[in-house]
Amino acid sequence: MKNFIEELQWRGMLHDSMPGTEEHLLEEMRSAYVGFDPTADSLHIGNLVPIMLLAHYQRCGHRPIALVGGATGMIGDPSGKSAERNLLDETTLRHNQECVKAQLGHFLDFTSDEKSAAILVNNYDWMKDISFLEFIRDIGKHITVNYMMAKDSVKNRISSESKDGMSFTEFTYQMVQGYDFLHLFRENSTTIQMGGSDQWGNITTGTELIRRIGNGKGYAITCPLITKSDGSKFGKSEGGNVWLDANRTSPYKFYQYWLNTSDEDAEKYIKIFTFLDKDTIDSLVAEHAEVPHTRILQKRLGEEVTVLVHGREEYEKAIKASNILFGKSTASDLKSLDEKTLLDIFDGVPQATVAASLVENGLDMIAALAAETNFLKSNGEARRALKENAISINKEKVKEDFVITKEDLIDKKYVLLQKGKKNYYLLIVA
RNA sequence: GGGGAGAUACUCAAGCGGCCAACGAGGACGGACUGUAACUCCGUUGACUAUGUCUUCGCAGGUUCGAAUCCUGCUCUCCCCA
């Protein structure tokens, strides 16, 4: 049995743990769980830390449990929130749970015959049949309001400048989450709950319930909330959240997100988001320090995480796309692509369709950029961009007098327009 | 209720009768540099049938050859006194 706490420590994933947790884990195989909010039909990379927590946990020989918060998701965790949350209806929740379940399968082994096979539970299943009366009599009796009020998540909402106050529903949240822990303790001998450091308060409500009602001992492990060195929020790019679902965030963009992390963050992230062992990471860091401009760390980080989430094949495509978009590729490289790869690469870039007859007669640049396609807001903007030498057709800079003809078509129907380095537009001729 | 200040482009902020599509700063975008980075430098930043034309300076009117600039009314914001 590998020492899980030690593993977390060198990976920088340990924020806090209850006294005795390490010994508890070394004795025998234990079950630990992490809760996931089914607020969307996909997880995003902000959820990746708790996921990795479970994944590392399983690799240390223990049994991970993923708890989908069907019930708690209906209430809304007040931790770190300043306003009342929107509640989700049951149909949406069920749908989201299914999607989340599928994504977790990439990280956790649910199917093995080992005792450490992961399991997935949904707290809605045991919460839905509990009556309010039952709950306040059997559970509520054991926790004082004074205890609940002392939690930061509650204090912040009641005392501070926050004028919105906090509903009874949200106040109850920690009890419901605490009950989950108690339930899993009784039904699955789960003795540990893990989560982000903001979950500490909620977790301890659970251990308290286990102590008072379950006559047992529960343990808590929290990991630091992940940050970025430049202060911006982790997991967000210009387009919003970076999702694990390929339909929401293409594997290419996903890979790019990791590739673009700063040196400092990459060193931190590679420990958290990959399964690479300490020696491998140490030597990668050393190598990277020698030749920082080659970005060894970022590339490896991107590779590991993308393969983990989307598979090797999608990763290869992301690399191919990256080379085309950022490398010194030429028009002939582009023309050598087959249609499917081309569309994959440019999945997600703005597209517009123009009639074949227009190209037949030669399509001038202003029309191609603005009038016919709305890639740019106005003809004036198109002229300006052309004057600034910002526009490329199929990777080659063009001037204002350029005219698109049949010669420029890729696969007889596509033209790649580009403004500056990063803005691509795909023109489809039909 | 009484008195005062203000409303200008994505944001902040000049302009106070013609030289104003409107100084400057930030942001954004582009170019050079670079590690698909940071820094730095340069350029662009209302629209159009483009050395010109049109529409913009809270809203609606008015004065004037001419208004972001002056006058009247309205709406909103801020401050002070009750």
Image (tube, coloured by chain):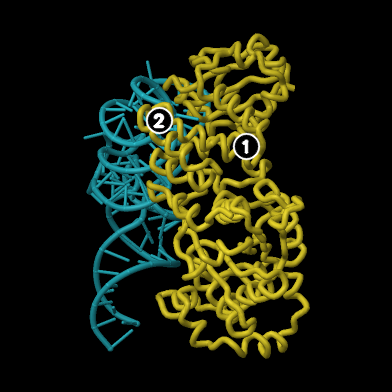
Element assignment for label 1: helix
The residue under the point 52% across, 55% down is A3
Q: Position of residue A63 (x, y in %)?
A: 66, 59
Q: Which residue is mark 1?
A: A307
A251 relative to B3, above or below:
above
Q: For residue A58, say whether it is visible.
A: yes
Pointer 2 and pointer 1 on the same chain: yes
The residue under the point 57% across, 40% down is A305
Q: Are marks 2 and 1 in contact (CB under 8 Å)?
A: no
**The quadrant where residue A416 appears:** top right
Q: Colour of chain A?
A: yellow
The residue under the point 50% across, 58% down is A5
Q: How many marks?
A: 2
The residue under the point 61% across, 51% down is A55
Q: Position of residue A413 (x, y in %)?
A: 71, 19
Chain ID of residue with mark 2: A
Outermost residue on the top side: it is A407
Q: Which mark is residue A287?
A: 2
Q: Position of residue A119 (x, y in %)?
A: 72, 59
Q: For residue A82, say whether it is visible.
A: no
Rounded to the nearest angstrom, the CA distance separating label 2 from label 1 is: 22 Å
Which corner quadrant holds the C terminus of chain A?
Answer: top right
A237 relative to A153, above or below:
above
Q: Colour of chain B?
A: cyan
Q: Which mark is residue A224?
A: none
Q: Amino acid at mark 1?
A: Val
- Dot 2 or dot 1: first in sequence order is 2
Chain ID of residue with mark 1: A
Q: Amino acid at mark 2?
A: Glu
Which corner quadrant holds the N terminus of chain A?
Answer: bottom right
